[in-house]
Amino acid sequence: MANIRLENVSKRFGRVTALQSINLEMHHGEFFCVLGPPGAGKTTLLRLIVGLEKPDEGDIYIDDERVNDVHPRDRDIAMIFQNLALYPDKSVFDNVAFPLRERKMPAEEVRARVTQVARMLHIEHLLERKPGKLSGGERQRVAIARALVRTPRAYLMDEPLANLDALLRLEMRIELKRLQEQLNETLVYVTSDQVEAMSMADRVAVLYKGVVQQCDTPDNVYNLPANRRVATIVGSPPMNFLTCQVQRADGQLNLVHSGFGFQVIGSDHPLWDCLCRALPTVQEVLVGVRPEDIRLYPERPTDIIAFPACVAVSEPLGAETIVDVQLGRDIIKVITPPTQHFDEKQDIWVAFDMAKVHVMDAQTGVRIYTTGAPEQLQCILPGTCA
């Protein structure tokens, strides 16, 4: 196992900054995911760790050894590329055995190691075939076997499932997670697929334009996003963002939108203190609510405060329906059960789960506050606040 640490690492290609001041640590035996959209710098990060690129600034450590100037061969890190890079003219056995033969390992030991790894990945019946005769999932297992057979200190994977179909990706996600737990090795996994990151990782680092936006457990990244970018990258559909005016009058502090309003309860409320210190510099904030934390009602409910709205578009997806709703001047997305049907242009009522409302700085996008409890913000109907 290996502990990998990056301290203030930056990498530039000409005028383009691929990575900027990266500080990350991947712990021994951890399944660590780097999640981000295309062009975020994910592959560059892996290439720096394995030694295919050198950082312009900062230091890279493997087990507390600075490896900036260590040759990739001597770092003892296995990397699995997106294109798998199998030798088409070699059999599966020869592909898997290649790194061992490069080390001049005795033939009997090579055969024993290859056979052991093949059994682990259930590909022992494929050892005599060529890669061209294999399915996508089988080729994927061969690439993983070639990395495993070396018993390196850590494994790096660069979007290895991107070229597989949806069903096979699901199968391979389960297989990779099982394998990592069985080996108890450090695995750094790069992906632009949030489902892969959220379902497999012990921790997730969200990367955007070469900057780490947040590094935390999948639960915290989803439920407590550090900023608007994280809330957009993680979640499908992404979080709804609604611009609200901050109004303070007559001892009250309100967040006012054209379709709804919130009143901050009590001057001892952390959000009250935060916003009052920011006024008058901050005139507006973003209220963020995930589509699954919104409820739609065909009639006005009597037990909660709901806001009038109108259905714009309905998208049935089988297990759920995504409804686009016109709320004031904005369109929001709402996830509803498939049994709930709404017609286009139908008048409805919208209610938020008040325990899961996020408040963010409208200028920087940084999360200011997450309610966490429904009594901290009180709904007020449009027109009832100045």
Image (spheres, rainbow, N blue to C red):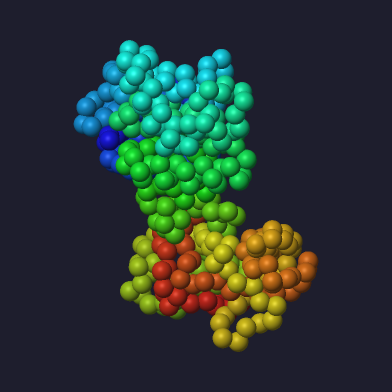
Instruction: Please state the horizontal and vertical placement of residue 160, each as a whole percent of the image.
Output: 51, 34
Could you tell whether 163 is left or right of 210 in the image? right
Q: Is residue 160 above or below residue 385?
A: above
Q: Is residue 10 above or below residue 325?
A: above
Q: Residue 277 sits in which quadrant?
A: bottom left
- Residue 209 visible, this angle: no
Q: Looking at this rendering, what residue extends furthest in the right direction?
A: 344
Q: Looking at this rendering, what residue extends furthest in the bottom direction?
A: 302
Could you tell whether 340 is left or right of 351 in the image? right
Instruction: Please state the horizontal and vertical placement of residue 243, each as a whole percent of the image.
Output: 56, 60
Where is the N terminus found, in terms of image quarters? Answer: top left
How many marks overall?
Answer: 0
Residue appearing at x 69%, y 58% in the figure: 317
Residue appearing at x 48%, y 37% in the figure: 122
Q: Is residue 338 above or below residue 108?
A: below
190 or 206, nearer to the observer: 190
Residue appearing at x 52%, y 31% in the figure: 125
Instruction: Please state the horizontal and vertical placement of residue 192, each as a whole percent of the image.
Output: 52, 40
132 or 119, nearer to the observer: 119
Q: Is residue 164 above or below residue 285?
A: above
Instruction: Please state the horizontal and vertical placement of residue 256, each as a whole percent of the image.
Output: 55, 69
Where is the C terminus found, in terms of image quarters? Answer: bottom right
Q: Residue 145 sits in which quadrant?
A: top left
